Image: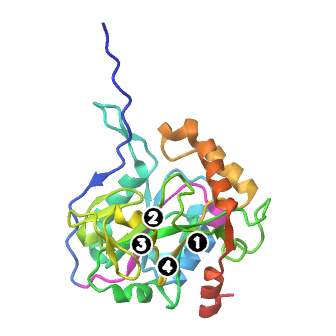
Amino acid sequence: MFWKLPILGKISKIGIVPPPPEPDRHGLAIVLIVRNEARHIGEWAAFHARAGARAFFVYDNGCTDATLPILRETLGDRLTVLPWRQTFSDARMGREIHNQVLAYAHAASNFGGAFRWMSFIDVDEFLIPKSADSLPEALAHLGEHRNISLPWHMFGHSGHETPPEGGVLRNYLRRAADPMSDVRGVRAFKVIVDPCHLTALRVHSMETDGSDRTCDDRGEPASAAEREKPGFYSADHVQLNHYYARSRQELAEKIGRGPNLVAKSPEYARKVRRTVENIEAAEVEDRAALDYLARIGWN
């Protein structure tokens, strides 16, 4: 008799040895894995450069459009591009290794020693300073904190059937009313960390100094479990906008591209559509991005 082994989940958490700090380390680095995002990459890169990101480490997951030339033109010597088109698995157990997490671990291990902060976001995510003129200024009050969790502010279609002129920030102004609601079936965060203390990482949570202790953008601490509670919410200093749906045309294209993990493919379209329905079930106007653009005089 042959016994069928159970189907095991993906390897989505990777432990690392943190890099040693360089003597003059400072500033914020942003890590991005990207594939064919020419339509929006220029706005994303120009915004975060203007917001004070010191360096960008872009992992190229097989771009065939103008994404990389646009990044090079926009960011110049702030940009490092690494080829990252691959699918790895544990050869013994057959578990797929999360390629995005692998990129994040590589970036932190190899480049993190030069930076005070490192953030790991996607092209549809923008870090918005709420009162300061730059992201480093917005983080300066956090002192020796090493792990910051920012809740997603989830934006839907804002009534757009096709991609509007003028970019994302000026055209998508409606988001889910409660940033701490579980519109994806789980509350989601992205993390800004001190890479010289990073010891384990996933896409949405990271450990520093072997602990899952994190804090909100005010510096109020919490465990990974405690950050799920409504009282953890803060966007006083930095707001993470996630333009999940964009136009209906772009949502269809997103579904057509499929997920980063092959194992997720069968459920992907249903999950994406359900998430958008949940976002748009209760929306509010959000002008935080527009307020920042006006404050810095970016036309």
Question: Could you tell me which residue is drawn at 72 percent across and 62 percent down?
Answer: 157
Q: Point out residue 236 in the picture as x, y percentages from the top left corner.
A: 48, 84
Q: Earlier in the sequence, mark 3 or mark 2?
A: 2
Would residue 57 be counted in the magenta stretch? no
Q: Earlier in the sequence, mark 1 or mark 2?
A: 1
Please state, as top left, top right, bottom left or bottom right, where the N terminus lies in the image: top left
The amino acid on which the numbered mark 3 sits, given as a three-letter code, is Phe
Please state, as top left, top right, bottom left or bottom right, where the C terminus lies in the image: bottom right
Q: Nearer the viewer, residue 37 or 203?
A: 203
Q: Point out residue 25 in the picture as x, y percentages from the top left corner.
A: 28, 82
Which label is found at residue 77?
A: none
Q: Which residue is mark 2?
A: 189
Q: Nearer the viewer, mark 1 or mark 4?
A: 4
User: Which SS class for mark 4?
Assistant: loop
The amino acid on which the numbered mark 1 sits, given as a three-letter code, is Trp
Q: Which residue is mark 1?
A: 44
Q: Nearer the viewer, mark 3 or mark 2?
A: 3
Q: Which residue is mark 4?
A: 235
The amino acid on which the numbered mark 2 sits, given as a three-letter code, is Phe
Q: Which residue is mark 3?
A: 232
On screen, 216 above or below 137? above
Determine if residue 56 is in view. Answer: no
Q: Point out residue 87 in the picture as x, y percentages from the top left corner.
A: 42, 41
